[in-house]
Image (tube, rainbow, N blue to C red):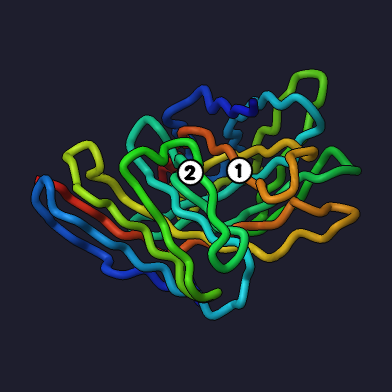
Amino acid sequence: DAGITQSPRHKVTETGTPVTLRCHQTENHRYMYWYRQDPGHGLRLIHYSYGVKDTDKGEVSDGYSVSRSKTEDFLLTLESATSSQTSVYFCAISETPRLSGSGGANVLTFGAGSRLTVL
Amino acid sequence: AQSVAQPEDQVNVAEGNPLTVKCTYSVSGNPYLFWYVQYPNRGLQFLLKYITGDNLVKGSYGFEAEFNKSQTSFHLKKPSALVSDSALYFCAVRDAHSGAGSYQLTFGKGTKLSVIP
């Protein structure tokens, strides 16, 4: 997990409270991603970023927002947490794909995960 | 749309025996295919990928995977399993022709591999 850290690693909160998870990278990679992992669902993409202030929605973006004001930081915010958002959240980073050859086939490097429990 | 199926939730194999973890995929164009492994309380780690060329791809820790276009499969294999291979394995796919700005991988649900001593 070198080069990418997530905080907090564990959090318990109550329904209706706001929560922010932070992903910090030291690799200077352009692309950053937030996934959630749930039993029976594998990993599902929440949001991703392809540059500072450039973000887009993933498969399960409802109830989540993101921000990226610096290359190294990608924040995931739950404006009003619900029990259905209890999950393990993973941040990932990847290099800019090359424009030819295997462009786009970049490998993801994942953080260690943040376990969120919403009571 | 792109999708991945891992038909087995769990695979049990005896130490020293060959192992196979199955994966099938669906994309509209040509696929980029990946295998990742997750050890307990850790993030996912990259094992190997198929982009183009040789259908047999070799990766980390002695793992390999075979791309079969006609069967739309990308099964993960290892000739001799180790107890330390016990982990959760994820197959992932993306369409090689996804538009710029979108390099989203779609992951399977994962297969838990247990290697029995």
Q: Position of residue B69 (x, y in %)?
A: 81, 25
Residue B50 sits in which quadrant?
top right
The residue that disc 2 covers is A45
Q: CA distance from mark 2 to mark 1?
A: 8 Å
Residue B74 sits in which quadrant?
top right
Residue at image point 36% right, 67% down: A22
The reply to whether callout 2 and callout 1 are in contact (CB within 8 Å) is: yes
Looking at the image, which is closer to me, A59 or A37? A59
Give the farthest residue toward the top. B71
Quarter of the C terminus of chain A within the rendering: top left
Q: Chain of mark 1?
A: B
Q: Chain of mark 2?
A: A
Mark 1 falls on what kind of element? loop
Mark 2 falls on what kind of element? strand
Vertical arrangement, residue B39 with respect to residue B20, above or below = below
Q: Label 2 sits on what residue type?
A: Leu
The total number of labels drawn is 2
Left or right: where B29 falls relative to B102:
right
Vertical arrangement, residue A28 with respect to residue B35, above or below = below
The residue that disc 1 covers is B105
Q: Position of residue B47 (x, y in %)?
A: 63, 54
Q: Position of residue B110 (x, y in %)?
A: 47, 36
Q: Label 1 sits on what residue type?
A: Leu
Q: Position of residue A17 (x, y in %)?
A: 13, 53
Residue at image point 91% right, 43% down: B53
